[in-house]
Image (spheres, helix red, strand yellow):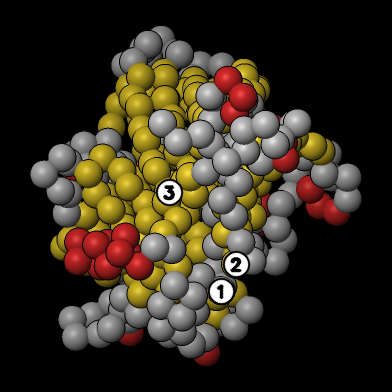
Amino acid sequence: MIPEPWINKVSNPAQLGGIETSILDNGAGRGTRVAWINTGTGLRFKVVLDRSMDISEAFHNQHSLAWLSHGGITAAEPAVNSGIDWLRTFGGGLLTTCGLTHVGGPEQDAFGDRGLHGPISNIPAEIESIIQPDPRSGQLSMSITGRMRESRVFGPSLELKRTISAVLGQPSIRIQDTVTNHANTPAPHMLLYHFNFGWPLVDEGTRLLWKGDWQAREGGINGAIFQEGSDFKTCPAPIDTHSGTGEAVAFINPAPNEMGQCTAGLFNEQLGLAVTLRFQKDQLPWLTNWQHWGKGEYVTGIEPGTHPPIGQAKARAEGSLLFLEPGESRSYQVDLDVLTDQRAIDNLLKLL
C-alpha cells in the first residue's frame, strides 16, 4: 500500500481541507450562518446554513462554478411564500432548494395559496452534526447534517433532513436528503434541486449535457430557443431578448443508464472543465433546463426534481402529485462531480 503523501508532514488537518463555520457580518446577509467546505482538490464551496443548507459560492481552482444574483446571500425570511416574493431572496448560488409541497409559479386554489417555489429555501437549519476529516486516522470524509422544518399548526408539517458530504482528495459533493411528514394527515410533496451555473464555467460555446425527451414550457419566448433544429445545448452570447424576464425553459424526461442513474451537466472545452450531476431516476424522474442569457444575468439552471416546475395544482389535476402519509419519508441523493481529466471528460461526452 502506497502511503499518503501528507503522512508525517501535516500537523493540523485544516491544512489539507475540512469544514469551517462562520457568521456573515455585513450587508443583506448579516447574521447568516455559513460553512465553507474545502475538499483539498481545488473544489471549495459555501453552505448557507440559514438558507436550507443551500450552496452559494462554489469554485474549482480559480474558476467559479455558480451564478450569483445581484442580491447574493440575504437573511432568511421564513414567511416568504406569496406571489413572486421568492425572487427577492433568490441569491442564485450553486444550489437553491425548491419545495417541499410546491414547485412552480404562484397559484391559488381550493387547497390554499402558494408562492413561487415554496418557502423551504428561506428556512434555517438546526445543525445536528459536523464531522471533520482526520487523515491521521484514515478518515478522509467530512459532512454536515441539519434539519429544516416547513411546518404550521394544522399542517402540513414536513421536515427536510440534509447531509452534505465530501472527501479529501475528491472534487465531488454529495447531497443526501430525507423528507418526512410529521403531521397526522397526508401532505402533498414536490421537490426540485435548482442548480445554477455561471461564468466562467458557463460561457459562449459551453456545452449543456443531458439526454432524454424534452418539451418547451408553455408561454414566454421558449420557442425561440427550445425548438427542433435549434442548438439549445450550446451556450450563446448574452441575448437582448433575455433582458428583464426573458428566459427559456425545457422540461426533460432524462434517460437513465442500466443502473437507473441519470447524468446531466456542462462542459467548457476552453477551460478543460466539466461538471456533472448524478441522480436516480426513481427518486428524481424529471430534469428542467432553465436558460436566462441576460446581460449581467447570464445563467443556466440544470434542475433534477420530482416534477418539472408545473405547480401543485397542475400536478394534482394530472395525477402526478406525490403525497406523504403521516410518518412517511422519501429519500433523495444528488452527486456533483468536477472533471478535468480528459479521458473522464471523453467518456462523459460519449454517454451524453
- Residue at point 58%, 20% (across, down): 137
Residue 20 seen in this snapshot: yes
Residue placed most toward the observer, 270 or 103: 270
Nearer the N terminus, badge 1 or badge 3?
A: 1
Say what amino acid the circle numbered 2 marks.
Answer: His
Nearer the N terminus, badge 2 or badge 3?
A: 2
Closer to viewer: mark 1 or mark 2: 2
Give the residue at mark 2: 63
- Whole-Å distance between the Cαs marked 1 and 2? 6 Å
Give the residue at mark 1: 200
Q: How many residues crowd around disc 2 within 10 Å: few (fewer than 14), some, or many (20 or more)?
A: some
**Label 3: element kind:** strand
- Residue at point 72%, 40% (across, down): 15
- Considering every residue shown, the one lying at the far right of the view is 26
- Whole-Å distance between the Cαs marked 2 and 3? 16 Å
Left or right of 29 on screen, residue 113: left
Say what amino acid the circle numbered 3 marks.
Answer: Leu
Residue 327's disc number:
none
Residue placed most toward the observer, 98 or 277: 277
Say what amino acid the circle numbered 1 marks.
Answer: Pro
**Label 1: element kind:** loop
Compared with residue 169, is residue 155 higher up or lower down, i.e. above or below? above
- Whole-Å distance between the Cαs marked 1 and 3? 18 Å
Quarter of the picture holding the N terminus: top left
- Residue at point 59%, 55% (across, down): 42
Give the residue at mark 3: 336
Q: Do labels 1 and 2 touch, CB within 8 Å?
A: yes
